[in-house]
Image (cartoon, rainbow, N blue to C red):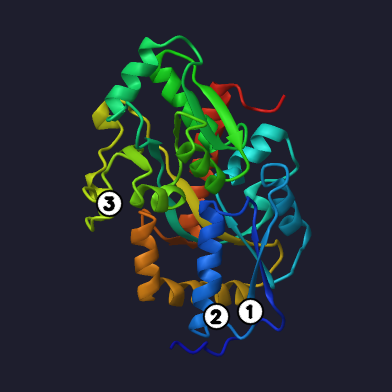
């Protein structure tokens, strides 16, 4: 076990861990994993309490943290709605309103179909999209004008045909809808669909990154994450990575930030973290300080450009 070190500041009451998304999705799963391993390894003197605040495409959670100035007993895990929600809704929030702590990892996106789908490859899926009338294919995703719909717009641009986008409350629900054949495809994160893939219910067609996933341990009867081809190699040049990062409210002190940086350093050193990264096929990029802030600025601009092209920017 790893004992918590003595710090200039330590929490004196439970730590509220805000998830600006629904239960069962990638952010929720990572937050609850962190909550569990921190308790198991006695890494905090106070418990971590996960609270889902998904209203308004995550605006509820972000505005709550923004408004709780100087409160070091609150942290938030982010996903792409850190950028997309204020751009799409005009809600008075920007990532600069919070205190950046650390990028924990980047999350991948995979094009999924039901295992019984006629589309055996990403090329077959693309060919079908090109050949069928507009809006024949149904893509399930999380929320409207969020990352899943942005990716859908990129896919239909390649296909030259419109794809019907069907929004659901969270990534876990999206995967269940695909298992039930209520949609034709999804772009779930790996961890959101991994259990259904392992159970032989879903098929992974391609990963939306320039590099293949490095994880070679076989998860299904025939495939590892490393066996999933890149979408670009299949004729779908769509690359998209999502932030799994930590922020605190504004106006916290450097000592308070340092406490959480040390906490996440210890968590990332655990064998359980390695297993979690492999299970969810995460891209293990971790940034802090100026490097993290610079990455945030670049990706905010990238989302502004993608959403402007898709017509998703609030008027």
Q: Are marks 1 and 2 in contact (CB under 8 Å)?
A: yes
Instruction: Give the side of residue 30 with respect to residue 9, left or right.
Output: left
Q: Could you say whether the residue bearing mark 3 is in a helix, strand or loop?
A: loop
- Give above or below for 299 relative to 66: above
Q: Which mark is residue 179?
A: none
The x and y percentages for residue 98 are 66, 56
Query: Which numbered mark, 3 or 1, is in the foreground of this view?
Result: 3
Q: CA distance from mark 3 to mark 2?
A: 31 Å
Crowding near the residue tagged with mark 1, few <14, some 14–19, many ≥20 C-alpha atoms within 10 Å: some
Q: Quadrant of the C terminus?
A: top right
Q: Secondary structure at mark 2?
A: helix
Q: Is residue 43 shown to the viewer in this render?
A: yes
- In three-dimensional space, the C-alpha distance between marks 1 and 2, rounded to whole angstroms, equals 7 Å
Q: Nearer the viewer, mark 3 or mark 2?
A: 3
Residue visible at 34% across and 52% down in the picture: 198
Say which mark, if any, is on residue 39.
Answer: 2
Residue 282 drawn above or below residue 147: below
Residue corresponding to mark 1:
47
Figure check: 179 above or below 261:
above
Q: Which residue is mark 3?
A: 220
Residue plotted at (36% across, 38% down): 208
Left or right of 299? Residue 159 is: left
* Earlier sequence position, callout 3 versus callout 2: 2
Closer-to-camera residue (136/216):
136
């Amino acid at each position: 076990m790893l004992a918590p070190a003595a710090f200039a500041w330590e929490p004196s009451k439970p730590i509220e861990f805000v998830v600006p998304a629904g239960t069962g999705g990638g952010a929720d799963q990572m937050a609850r994993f962190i909550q569990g391993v921190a308790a198991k390894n006695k890494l905090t003197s106070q418990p971590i309490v996960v609270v889902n605040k998904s209203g308004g495409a995550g605006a509820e959670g972000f505005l709550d943290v923004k408004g709780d100035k100087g409160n070091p007993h609150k942290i938030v895990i982010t996903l792409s709605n850190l950028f997309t929600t204020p751009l799409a809704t005009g809600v008075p929030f920007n990532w600069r309103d919070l205190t950046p702590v650390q990028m924990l990892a980047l999350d991948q996106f995979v094009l999924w179909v039901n295992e019984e789908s006629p589309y055996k490859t990403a090329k077959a899926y693309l060919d079908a999209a090109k050949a069928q009338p507009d809006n024949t294919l149904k893509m399930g995703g999380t929320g409207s004008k969020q990352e899943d719909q942005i990716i859908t717009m990129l896919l239909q641009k390649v296909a030259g045909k419109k794809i019907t986008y069907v929004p659901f409350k969270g990534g876990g629900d999206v995967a269940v809808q695909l298992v039930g054949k209520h949609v034709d495809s999804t772009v779930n994160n790996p961890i959101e669909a991994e259990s259904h893939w392992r159970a032989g219910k879903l098929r992974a067609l391609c990963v939306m990154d320039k590099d293949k996933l490095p994880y070679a341990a076989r998860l299904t009867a025939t495939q590892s994450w490393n066996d999933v081809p890149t979408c670009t190699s299949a004729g779908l040049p769509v690359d998209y990575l999502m932030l799994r990062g930590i922020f605190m409210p504004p106006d916290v002190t450097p000592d308070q930030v340092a406490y959480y940086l040390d906490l996440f350093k210890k968590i990332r050193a655990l064998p359980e973290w390695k297993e979690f990264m492999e299970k969810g096929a995460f891209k293990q990029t971790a940034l802090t300080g100026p490097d993290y802030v610079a990455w945030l600025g670049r990706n905010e601009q990238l989302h502004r450009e993608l959403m402007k092209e898709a017509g998703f920017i609030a008027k």
